[in-house]
Amino acid sequence: MPPTDIGPPDYKTMLHPVIKSNYGKWRYHEILKPGVLKHVAESGEAIYTVRAGSPRLLSTDRIREICDIADKYCDGYLRFTSRNNIEFLLDDPRKIDSLIDELETKNYPIGGTGHSISNVVHTQGWVHCHTPATDASGPVKAVMDELYDYFTEMKLPAHVRIALACCLNMCGAVHCSDIAILGIHRTVPKPDNSLVPNLCEIPTTVASCPTGAVRGDMKNKTVIVDEDKCMYCGNCYTVCPAMPIADPSNDGISIWVGGKVSNARSAPMFSKLVIPYLPNNPPRWPEVVQAVKNIVEVYAANARKHERLGEWIERVGWERFFTLTGIPFTDKHIDDFDMAIETFRTSAQFKWR
């Protein structure tokens, strides 16, 4: 096919020669040490990966620095994972230690492989998004500073994936991560009736609400919000700037646990709410950091080898999870939304200890 400038470039032109010549023909892989992987092909060729953490939001100077390191040790071959790790790809194992030494000199953490906490996938936050209930980069930095050793060492029972979304539209993977940090709005959007007629298309604004909480007030050329139906997603504000939802006094963070994408051992799981609200306390978010650290440490002390966080909870029971972590169970944990009966536990098998 002729080249085109429409759409993404063909990724196969950018593959490492060892990957390209052995594509889909791999025999096994192993973790040589935290942050270092070895993949061996059926042909006997091997490729080595050195994984380093990144802050996701990168300056051009930092990207150039990363590329210079890849040019020096890897013939320019590197990739970013879906969780924003940087992976340097080498076919010469003699360069691994030198590469790691230079990365550590430049303060890049090495790890995120095996039974560890990988890099946190997160959303835009205050730096870019228009509907956040919290920041993204700030809480992630604060949390991972506290959990740094769990990234550089493989001392957990299994993989732990953490995600952050700054609102429940969740362009992060909070619905399917072991631990999810989710920004929440707690007040409904407030239509500015003097601006709605000039800034917003009322039919579009009404149609934007997934729960039917917004209805038109055609007499006054504005809209009305039904507070009982609103789920605070901010979709209406996206199409109608005259309906701000941000509230510095009431916006905050919730914590969810137990999700996973993997099919290993058990089916994929959705995350479930465990802490309904924590305050926004920038720049270090101490309540959020302590809550996440507590969950990680209780899981590390009680789960079996290879058992993901959600699998451990399902084995010991949610009642036992709340007891071990010391997290209070409240009415906010009970799903009262339409059709929630499908998710209810309908037996009498509650085992509070």
Image (spheres, grey):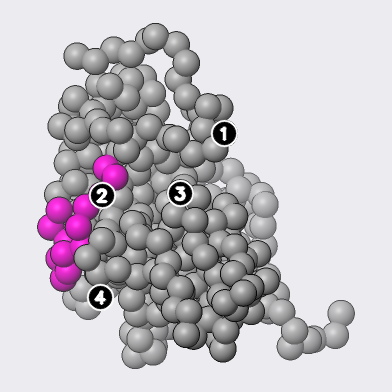
As measured in the structure, the alpha-carbon distance from the residue carrying label 1 to the one carrying label 4 is 55 Å
Label annotation for residue 102: 4
Which element carries disc 2, helix, strand or loop?
strand
- Give the residue number, with chain letter if any, for mark 2: 277
Label annotation for residue 339: 1
Query: What amino acid type is highlighted by mark number 1?
Result: Met
Q: Report the residue at 57% width, 34% height from top.
A: 339
Query: What amino acid type is highlighted by mark number 2?
Result: Tyr
Label annotation for residue 228: 3
Instruction: Tell which circle, 3 or 1, labels the residue nearer the N-terminal end.
Output: 3
Viewer-nearest of labels 4 and 2?
2
Question: Is 229 or 6 nearer to us in this picture?
Answer: 229
Residue 236, given in percent of the width and then of the height, sits at 53, 68
Instruction: Tell which circle, 1 or 4, labels the residue nearer the N-terminal end.
Output: 4
Residue occupying the far top of the picture: 348
Q: Is 221 displayed left or right of 293 in the figure?
A: right
Q: Do tag 1 and tag 2 residues touch (Cβ < 8 Å)? A: no
Q: Do tag 3 and tag 1 residues touch (Cβ < 8 Å)? A: no
Instruction: Tell which circle, 3 or 2, labels the residue nearer the N-terminal end.
Output: 3
Q: Is 30 displayed left or right of 316 in the figure?
A: right
Q: Report the residue at 19% width, 25% height from top.
A: 323
